[in-house]
Amino acid sequence: MTGGHFITLEGGEGAGKTTLLSTLKARLEALGHEVVLTREPGGTPGAEAIRALLVTGAADRWMALSELCLFFAAREDHLERLIRPALARGAIVLCDRFSDSTRAYQGQAGGAGRAAVEALDGLIVGHTQPDLTLILDIDPAIGLKRAAARRGTEDRFEGKAFAFHTALRAAYLEIAETFKHRCGVVDASVAPEELADSAWALLVARLKLS
């Protein structure tokens, strides 16, 4: 196998990305693919150190542009040390969040602005764009209730005002329309098994995997 696939999962808090990623990884490995499961911010030691600054503490810990720069600093390390090498050897990379989270959380809902996000994305991500992005759509009231049930120390974004989470959902749906060539929206309010089947059908159809 040459030339891997880059698949990202996106969505608001409590959308079920973690459970879905595990299911997709198992199904892809059953087909004989090497699968690298990773996350953002994080995935490498340097990026994980930056993650600790971003996902803990008070909701207003960072100004919008400071937060944006931290995310892209983590992303550059992640790309150079893990994602690009894995893709080069033909692996399938499954990533829990990527640039679309930055577009939604920092760019639109967070107020940093679209221009700043796209400028940094062009500089740091460049041509390493996802082949497929699955956007898990869910009513934020449902998602936040789910998230509260498993809340730990990494709850900084969950603590933002409900209006922020409403804006997030709208931002993700706008992203799906803007980048429809690589994005697919799936209903994340359903049971995990149904969500997995819907996501898998979309993945196989879009990437023509076997």
Image (cartoon, grey):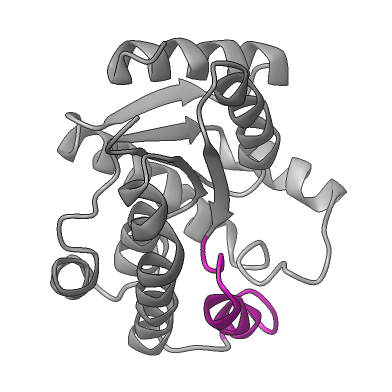
| Quarter that holds the N terminus | top left
Residue 42 is left or right of residue 173, and the answer is right
Which of the 4 image quarters holds residue 98?
A: bottom left
Q: Residue at x 37, y 58 (%)?
A: 85
Toward the viewer: 161 or 93?
Answer: 93
Tally of marks: 0
Point out residue 122 in the picture as x, y percentages from the top left corner. 14, 67
Point out residue 169 in the picture as x, y percentages from the top left corner. 43, 43
Residue 74 is left or right of residue 158, and the answer is left
Q: Residue at x 69, y 47 (%)?
A: 144
Q: Is residue 209 visible?
A: yes
Which of the 4 image quarters holds residue 180?
A: top left
Please provide the residue range marked out in magenta. Answer: 40-60
Point out residue 8 in the picture as x, y percentages from the top left corner. 42, 42
Magenta residue check for 58: yes
Magenta residue check for 8: no
| Quarter that holds the C terminus | top left
The correct choice, above or below, for 60 with respect to 146 in the image is below
Point out residue 128 in the picture as x, y percentages from the top left corner. 23, 54
Q: Residue at x 35, y 75 (%)?
A: 76
The correct choice, above or below, for 124 with respect to 168 in the image is below
The correct choice, above or below, for 3 with respect to 125 in the image is above
Q: Residue at x 36, y 43 (%)?
A: 172
Toward the viewer: 136 or 111?
Answer: 136
Q: Is residue 9 visible?
A: no
Toward the viewer: 142 or 5?
Answer: 5
